[in-house]
Amino acid sequence: MTALQLDTKPNWFMANWQQLAGFGLPVLAIAIYIGDDIVEGGARLFLQRLFDGLDNGAIYAVVAVALVLIFKATTLINFAQGELAMFGSFLAYVGAVTLGLDDVKVGPIPLGLLLSIVVAMVISAAIGAGIERVLIRPFDPSDHLPVVLITLGLFLILNSLAAFVWNVNPREFPSLFPARNESGAQNFVEIAGARLFYDVIGTYIVLAAIGLALYFILQRTKIGLAFRAVSSNTESARLVGVRVGRVLGFGWALASAFGTLGGALVAPKLFLKPDMMALLLIFSFAAATVGGLDSLIGAIVGGLSIGLIQSVLVGYLGDNDSAFIILSLAVAFVVILGVLWTKPAGLFGTSAVERV
Amino acid sequence: MKAGSDLAASPEALWSEVEAAADAGWPQWVRTLNRTVLVAAGLLLLILPFLVESIALRRNASLLVLSLGVLGLVVATGKAGLISLGHGAFVGLGAFAMGAFVDLVGLPYPLALTASFVTCCLFGWLLGLIALRVKGIYLALITMGLAVVFPSVAKRFPSITGGTSGRPIENTLDAPAWTGLTDSQTIAVRYYFCLVVCIAVFALTRNLLRGRIGRAMQAVRDGETAAAAFGVSIVRLKAGAFGYSAGLAGTAGALQVVLFPFVSHEQFNVFLSFRLYAAAVLGGIGAIIGAIYGVIAIVIVPTLNDIAGGLIRNDGRGLLDNDVIVFGVGLILLTFVSPDGFAGLVQRVGRRFSNRP
């Protein structure tokens, strides 16, 4: 309407061209590079890659949600998140396999396994809240160094503790959903020739359930309201009577529980072992960074897109399994670097305003 | 640093204030202790080959060499304020570069060492330029990513890294034939080579940090805006500091190749990075003497493990067989007790007992 508003259009492009180029050019280059491979492979292969990518992506998203929950509350990155998830999965393993609860099934539903995962999530939540209370709360959250050190220490302790109690050999972890390679079983749905396995569908359902649960907790409960208040402005929240410490503990508990769920989802695929989460954590970091470290929706979108990038791009580029892992690791690293470089707030995060 | 009031003062006044602040923290008592530790450690290192077997010598020498990695962290994190959880990757890069320069290019050892130092500096500087747009915890994130990704990527270049199984180095550093030294004495020659390099690098770094560059680093760490106002180029300084620190870590890796003529990606996993960082923090990341205390910690912790390792056992495996857990507990304890590490602890105790205010 006014000249001022007309002016903003070209300016927006000029102001954002670096970010546009940062995101757009690689995508364009990749599309040109693998375009004919996709056409050649046909719709079936592409759809299959899509399903696989969303499957991996859903797990990255779950762990990324845990990272974001902690970042939202305290602007800290919990480097021990992966190890906490690994430890929680071992707790579930104790219930399901060591105590033999996995044999308890009602029809096709593995009730015992479900129960042990839920119990492990509750215990992890208690551990998470305890860590926050004892190790994190004494420190000023605006100074990053002590908390980096604490979470690093936790990483080392949890890793060697798990190796001590359960040793380093990989173990089979029972899957919540019908296994893929059960002989003779029709355990997938066929869509245009591509196989959508039941366990993949199950992972999607779990991710959707987590999203709904989070939405309900944060938007419809009192503690969720307090959590949002603290993450938007800690000092103001404190002034209106929110018990900030308790809310932060709640955030850690929630994050640890979701982390454990993510660990229990990925353990049947990777085998359960103490260093199971090291690589997964990098993908989840990448997911959280892409989505914006303080955005829960961003974490889910980021996780799914990292999974897709990994499966579509690397699936078409890589020639074998080892190349697959290495290329996708490199891609995850480049994604973290690229996003932090061009747009540190990610896709959905709030940009930090720095006052000098 | 009180940025507002100092802006009117001249750069010289700022430097002298920084200098005064640095000196005020070190009472005579502590200086004496630090110097004693330094001299004792130096003497011990000099006569070490005459004291212990060649296996123990090899182990101690490899720890001595790692001190350069810790020193790199002191420069990057302690002096310039750049958190790096990925220095193990630079140690690995240095080792692989050294192996490549010695075997594939055929350079003599001192030249190859310099070349791998420069290579690591370059890579660190490049990563620095990219990563330094981000701060604090984000930098920790990026560098940790580097540490996790590095071994897998290294596996992909088998001609340099030997792929999955690793690669023995063909041109080893041996004593010249005319000296008539036996094989077991060769390790002593390698040890002295490493010792000389380490001492030289420590001295060089100390002088660098005492001079203009070191003061500029501290100014940037304490107040970026104020430092920029005094004409310090923040980007150049930070990238330079990161590059130099990566070069130090790379030298540690290169020297490791001198000691053990074998490279494999498994040596340079994420735990190496964490252990280096833990050692730097335990020793005291704010001062060069902290790197020395940190290395003493790296030496002492496994020894303590050997003594205490039999205490708790599970399947024949001790909880303390893995020294990582000690570093983990140490990190957390020290963060509570003395965030600036053992060097800082000594300093504070020293201040309490000194009669100067």
Image (tube, helix red, strand yellow):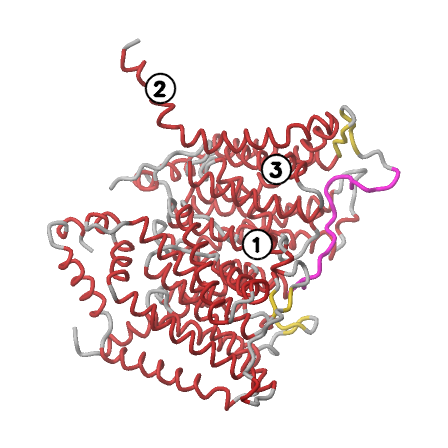
- Residue A56 vertical position relative to residue A27 in the rendered view, above or below: below
Magenta span of residues = A165-184
- Name the residue carrying label 2: A10
Q: Nearer the viewer, residue A276 or B39?
A: B39
- Residue B34 image offset from top left, x and y in percent: 32, 78
- The number of discs equals 3
For the stretch drawn in magenta, the main secondary structure is loop
The residue at 50%/33% (across/down) is A298
Residue A182 falls within the magenta-colored stretch: yes
- Name the residue carrying label 1: A83
Of the 4 image quadrants, the one containing the N terminus of chain A is top left
Left/right of residue B354 with respect to residue A42 in the rendered view: left
Q: Work out how far the residue at label 3 is from the one at label 2, CA to CA, in angstroms.
A: 34 Å
Q: Work out how far the residue at label 2 is from the one at label 1, CA to CA, in angstroms.
A: 47 Å
- Name the residue carrying label 3: A307
First-in-chain label (3 vs 2)? 2
The residue at 44%/76% (across/down) is B296
Name the outermost residue toward the top. A1
Examine the image and state in which quarter residue B336 appears. Answer: bottom left
